[in-house]
Amino acid sequence: MSTRVRTLGIGALAVGAALIALLGVLPSSDDVSVLRQTISQYGLTDNSWLFNLAVLLVAAGSAAIVAVLRAQRRLPTASVVLGSLWTVGLLVIVAFPKTNWAVQGAGTVGGTLHRSASVIAFVALPIAVLCAAGAAFPDAPGRRTLARVLGWASLGWFVAILAAVPVGIVVGGNWWELIPLGLMERGLAFTEVLALAALAVPANAVTVRT
Protein backbone atom coordinates (compact mmCIF):
# COMPACT_ATOMS: atom_id res chain seq x y z
CA MET A 1 0.00 0.00 0.00
CA SER A 2 2.77 2.46 0.92
CA THR A 3 4.45 1.85 -2.43
CA ARG A 4 1.22 2.67 -4.26
CA VAL A 5 0.61 5.82 -2.21
CA ARG A 6 4.19 6.96 -2.75
CA THR A 7 3.90 6.36 -6.50
CA LEU A 8 0.63 8.29 -6.64
CA GLY A 9 2.23 11.10 -4.65
CA ILE A 10 5.21 11.37 -6.97
CA GLY A 11 2.85 11.20 -9.95
CA ALA A 12 0.77 14.05 -8.53
CA LEU A 13 3.91 16.14 -8.08
CA ALA A 14 4.96 15.44 -11.67
CA VAL A 15 1.57 16.26 -13.17
CA GLY A 16 1.24 19.42 -11.07
CA ALA A 17 4.68 20.63 -12.15
CA ALA A 18 3.90 19.77 -15.77
CA LEU A 19 0.69 21.81 -15.64
CA ILE A 20 2.59 24.81 -14.29
CA ALA A 21 5.07 24.46 -17.14
CA LEU A 22 2.18 24.14 -19.60
CA LEU A 23 0.68 27.40 -18.35
CA GLY A 24 3.86 29.13 -19.43
CA VAL A 25 3.41 28.17 -23.10
CA LEU A 26 -0.37 28.35 -23.54
CA PRO A 27 -1.43 31.16 -25.90
CA SER A 28 -4.11 32.12 -23.37
CA SER A 29 -1.32 32.88 -20.87
CA ASP A 30 0.50 35.33 -23.13
CA ASP A 31 -0.31 38.21 -20.77
CA VAL A 32 1.77 36.60 -18.02
CA SER A 33 5.52 37.15 -18.32
CA VAL A 34 7.47 34.05 -17.38
CA LEU A 35 10.49 36.29 -16.90
CA ARG A 36 8.95 38.96 -14.68
CA GLN A 37 5.69 37.74 -13.14
CA THR A 38 5.25 35.08 -10.48
CA ILE A 39 3.46 31.77 -10.99
CA SER A 40 0.52 33.00 -8.92
CA GLN A 41 -0.27 35.51 -11.65
CA TYR A 42 -1.95 32.64 -13.52
CA GLY A 43 -4.48 32.59 -10.69
CA LEU A 44 -5.74 35.98 -11.90
CA THR A 45 -6.29 34.86 -15.49
CA ASP A 46 -8.85 32.74 -17.30
CA ASN A 47 -6.51 29.81 -16.62
CA SER A 48 -6.95 30.15 -12.86
CA TRP A 49 -8.66 26.74 -12.71
CA LEU A 50 -5.60 25.10 -14.25
CA PHE A 51 -3.28 26.91 -11.87
CA ASN A 52 -5.40 25.88 -8.88
CA LEU A 53 -5.51 22.26 -10.09
CA ALA A 54 -1.72 22.20 -10.48
CA VAL A 55 -1.11 23.56 -6.98
CA LEU A 56 -3.67 21.21 -5.43
CA LEU A 57 -2.00 18.24 -7.13
CA VAL A 58 1.37 19.27 -5.73
CA ALA A 59 -0.21 19.68 -2.28
CA ALA A 60 -1.90 16.28 -2.44
CA GLY A 61 1.27 14.60 -3.68
CA SER A 62 3.28 16.27 -0.93
CA ALA A 63 0.86 15.14 1.77
CA ALA A 64 0.97 11.56 0.47
CA ILE A 65 4.77 11.53 0.39
CA VAL A 66 5.09 12.99 3.90
CA ALA A 67 2.66 10.39 5.24
CA VAL A 68 4.48 7.47 3.60
CA LEU A 69 7.94 8.62 4.65
CA ARG A 70 6.75 9.11 8.21
CA ALA A 71 5.17 5.66 8.27
CA GLN A 72 8.47 4.21 7.05
CA ARG A 73 10.36 6.09 9.79
CA ARG A 74 12.33 7.95 7.14
CA LEU A 75 11.10 11.36 8.20
CA PRO A 76 11.97 13.03 11.54
CA THR A 77 9.32 14.99 13.40
CA ALA A 78 10.78 18.36 12.39
CA SER A 79 10.48 17.41 8.72
CA VAL A 80 6.88 16.28 9.22
CA VAL A 81 6.01 19.68 10.70
CA LEU A 82 7.87 21.58 7.98
CA GLY A 83 6.41 19.38 5.24
CA SER A 84 2.95 20.03 6.64
CA LEU A 85 3.61 23.78 6.57
CA TRP A 86 4.55 23.45 2.89
CA THR A 87 1.35 21.56 2.13
CA VAL A 88 -0.91 23.90 4.09
CA GLY A 89 0.85 26.87 2.50
CA LEU A 90 -0.02 25.56 -0.96
CA LEU A 91 -3.67 25.22 0.06
CA VAL A 92 -3.71 28.81 1.33
CA ILE A 93 -2.20 29.98 -1.97
CA VAL A 94 -5.17 28.45 -3.79
CA ALA A 95 -7.77 29.68 -1.29
CA PHE A 96 -6.48 33.27 -1.32
CA PRO A 97 -5.33 34.54 -4.74
CA LYS A 98 -2.56 37.13 -4.92
CA THR A 99 -3.44 40.81 -4.96
CA ASN A 100 -4.35 42.01 -8.44
CA TRP A 101 -2.38 45.24 -8.47
CA ALA A 102 -3.82 46.22 -11.85
CA VAL A 103 -7.27 46.48 -10.26
CA GLN A 104 -6.64 47.05 -6.55
CA GLY A 105 -4.65 50.04 -5.47
CA ALA A 106 -3.59 48.46 -2.19
CA GLY A 107 -2.92 45.02 -0.83
CA THR A 108 -5.78 42.96 0.53
CA VAL A 109 -5.98 40.64 3.52
CA GLY A 110 -6.27 37.68 1.15
CA GLY A 111 -3.27 38.92 -0.81
CA THR A 112 -1.24 39.23 2.39
CA LEU A 113 -2.17 35.68 3.39
CA HIS A 114 -1.21 34.48 -0.08
CA ARG A 115 2.19 36.16 0.07
CA SER A 116 2.89 34.98 3.62
CA ALA A 117 1.89 31.40 2.78
CA SER A 118 4.18 31.46 -0.25
CA VAL A 119 7.17 32.55 1.83
CA ILE A 120 6.49 30.00 4.56
CA ALA A 121 6.01 27.18 2.06
CA PHE A 122 9.10 27.98 0.02
CA VAL A 123 11.27 28.12 3.15
CA ALA A 124 9.75 25.14 4.98
CA LEU A 125 10.16 22.51 2.28
CA PRO A 126 13.92 22.74 1.63
CA ILE A 127 14.62 22.78 5.37
CA ALA A 128 12.40 19.71 5.73
CA VAL A 129 14.39 17.94 3.00
CA LEU A 130 17.72 18.88 4.58
CA CYS A 131 16.57 17.64 7.99
CA ALA A 132 15.29 14.37 6.52
CA ALA A 133 18.09 13.45 4.11
CA GLY A 134 20.13 11.58 6.68
CA ALA A 135 17.20 9.59 8.06
CA ALA A 136 15.81 8.86 4.61
CA PHE A 137 19.08 7.57 3.18
CA PRO A 138 21.31 6.37 6.05
CA ASP A 139 23.05 3.81 3.83
CA ALA A 140 22.87 5.59 0.46
CA PRO A 141 25.34 8.50 0.49
CA GLY A 142 24.74 9.34 -3.16
CA ARG A 143 21.01 9.75 -2.71
CA ARG A 144 21.54 11.57 0.57
CA THR A 145 23.84 14.04 -1.17
CA LEU A 146 21.39 14.54 -4.03
CA ALA A 147 18.57 15.40 -1.64
CA ARG A 148 20.78 17.82 0.25
CA VAL A 149 22.07 19.49 -2.92
CA LEU A 150 18.49 20.07 -4.11
CA GLY A 151 17.51 21.34 -0.66
CA TRP A 152 20.40 23.81 -0.57
CA ALA A 153 19.74 24.82 -4.18
CA SER A 154 16.14 25.62 -3.25
CA LEU A 155 17.29 27.82 -0.38
CA GLY A 156 19.80 29.41 -2.73
CA TRP A 157 17.02 30.49 -5.09
CA PHE A 158 15.10 31.98 -2.16
CA VAL A 159 18.11 33.85 -0.77
CA ALA A 160 18.89 35.23 -4.23
CA ILE A 161 15.35 36.59 -4.49
CA LEU A 162 15.44 37.97 -0.95
CA ALA A 163 18.77 39.68 -1.59
CA ALA A 164 17.09 41.96 -4.11
CA VAL A 165 15.10 43.65 -1.31
CA PRO A 166 18.03 45.48 0.41
CA VAL A 167 19.59 46.18 -2.98
CA GLY A 168 16.37 47.90 -4.03
CA ILE A 169 16.46 49.99 -0.86
CA VAL A 170 20.04 51.07 -1.53
CA VAL A 171 19.80 51.83 -5.25
CA GLY A 172 16.18 52.90 -5.22
CA GLY A 173 13.32 51.48 -7.23
CA ASN A 174 11.22 48.36 -6.91
CA TRP A 175 13.24 45.32 -5.82
CA TRP A 176 11.17 42.94 -7.95
CA GLU A 177 12.17 44.85 -11.06
CA LEU A 178 15.88 44.40 -10.35
CA ILE A 179 15.76 40.64 -10.96
CA PRO A 180 13.93 38.26 -13.32
CA LEU A 181 11.53 37.46 -10.48
CA GLY A 182 9.22 35.20 -12.47
CA LEU A 183 12.04 33.09 -13.82
CA MET A 184 13.73 32.81 -10.44
CA GLU A 185 10.50 31.86 -8.65
CA ARG A 186 9.85 29.15 -11.23
CA GLY A 187 13.38 27.86 -10.72
CA LEU A 188 12.73 27.81 -6.97
CA ALA A 189 9.40 26.02 -7.30
CA PHE A 190 10.61 23.31 -9.66
CA THR A 191 13.79 22.73 -7.62
CA GLU A 192 11.68 22.23 -4.49
CA VAL A 193 9.41 19.74 -6.24
CA LEU A 194 12.49 17.85 -7.41
CA ALA A 195 13.90 17.90 -3.87
CA LEU A 196 10.74 16.35 -2.46
CA ALA A 197 10.61 13.76 -5.23
CA ALA A 198 14.27 12.87 -4.62
CA LEU A 199 13.44 12.30 -0.95
CA ALA A 200 10.42 10.17 -1.81
CA VAL A 201 12.05 7.72 -4.19
CA PRO A 202 13.83 5.08 -2.07
CA ALA A 203 17.32 3.89 -2.80
CA ASN A 204 18.04 0.15 -2.93
CA ALA A 205 20.36 0.53 0.03
CA VAL A 206 17.78 2.22 2.26
CA THR A 207 17.10 0.32 5.43
CA VAL A 208 13.70 1.04 6.92
CA ARG A 209 14.04 1.38 10.68
CA THR A 210 11.62 -0.51 12.86
Image (cartoon, rainbow, N blue to C red):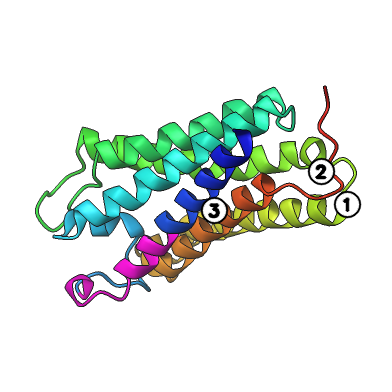
Badge 2 amino acid: Phe
**147 on left or right of 192:** right
Provide the residue designation for mark 1: 141
**143 on left or right of 169:** right
Disc 3 residue crowd, few under 14, some 14–19, many 20+, Cα 10 Å: many
Looking at the image, is mark 2 or mark 3 nearer the viewer?
2
Q: CA distance from mark 3 to mark 1?
A: 21 Å
Q: Residue at x 69, y 53 (%)?
A: 152
Front-most of residues 142 and 8: 8
Q: Residue at x 51, y 54 (%)?
A: 162
Contact, mark 3 vs mark 1 (Cβ under 8 Å)? no
Q: Residue at x 76, y 42 (%)?
A: 133
Q: Secondary structure at mark 2?
A: loop
Provide the residue designation for mark 2: 137
Q: CA distance from mark 2 to mark 3?
A: 18 Å
Front-most of residues 19 and 87: 19
* Residue range (magenta): 17-30
Residue 25, horizontal then vertical, whole percent: 31, 76
User: Does the magenta portion include 61?
Assistant: no
Main secondary structure of the magenta stretch: helix
Residue 193 badge? 3
Residue 104: tell me if it is visible: yes
Q: Is residue 118 above or below residue 88?
A: below
The N terminus is located in which quarter? top right
Contact, mark 2 vs mark 1 (Cβ under 8 Å)? yes
